[in-house]
Amino acid sequence: MEREGGGARAWLAGFLACFREAWGDRIPRERDFLFPDPRKGSACKRHNLFLRWVVRGGDGVDLGIWTVLGPRQLIVPVDTHMARLGKWLGLTSRHTVDGKMAEEITDAFRAVCPEDPVRFDFALTRIGILKACTVATRGTCGLCPLGPACSGGGT
């Protein structure tokens, strides 16, 4: 049985491969940076974020203009903020920000909201972006609404 997120990962791999092929062998390092291969372990944060924007809709943040995938198939875009909160909230046990971490966090969200597992992404990453939850804010977790579920800024 294929993982539910496997469809989006396979679709994204094919989509990005088209760009790599069109780019050709000119400056391969830049090509592979702009169009990574999720089959090689990349979390593909920028591309999963793009898919979130164009697939999800009706929330005032996302456009919802593509129908090739549904929200239930999306993978959480993992950046440093989501990785840190994902570890502290017990959504992932991984230390490396990669595709497997993105899938673990997505699976944890999918257990709560199978029809739209990335719906929590914006709210959680925003906490990190606004510096409301960082290593430097340890000790103020009691002020955070996530405090009861969080490991308090552990590793």
Image (spheres, helix red, strand yellow):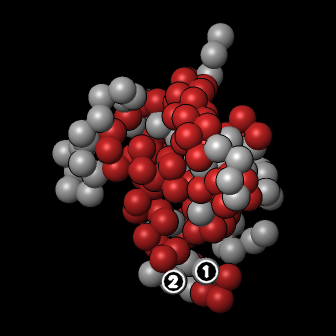
Q: Which residue is drawn at 46% across and 73% down?
A: 127
Quick one: 40 or 85, which is closer to the camera? 40
Q: Name the residue under label 2.
A: 131
| Amino acid, disc 1 | Thr
User: Where on the picture, by quarter, is residue 83?
Assistant: bottom right
User: Where on the picture, by quarter, is residue 97?
Assistant: bottom right
Mark 1 element type: loop
Q: Which residue is drawn at 59% across and 46% down?
A: 23
Answer whether labels 1 and 2 touch (C-beta < 8 Å). Answer: yes
Q: Residue at x 29, y 35 (%)?
A: 66
Q: Mark 1 points at which residue?
A: 134
Q: Is residue 89 visible?
A: no
In-image side of 80 versus 145 (left or right)? right
Q: Residue at x 71, y 47 (%)?
A: 25
Residue 45 locus on image (x, y percent):
57, 54
| Amino acid, disc 2 | Lys
Q: Is residue 52 above or below residue 87?
A: above
Quick one: 127 or 27, which is closer to the camera? 27
Residue 32 locus on image (x, y percent):
68, 52
Q: Which residue lies furthest to the top in this view?
A: 1
Q: Is residue 71 above or below residue 87?
A: above
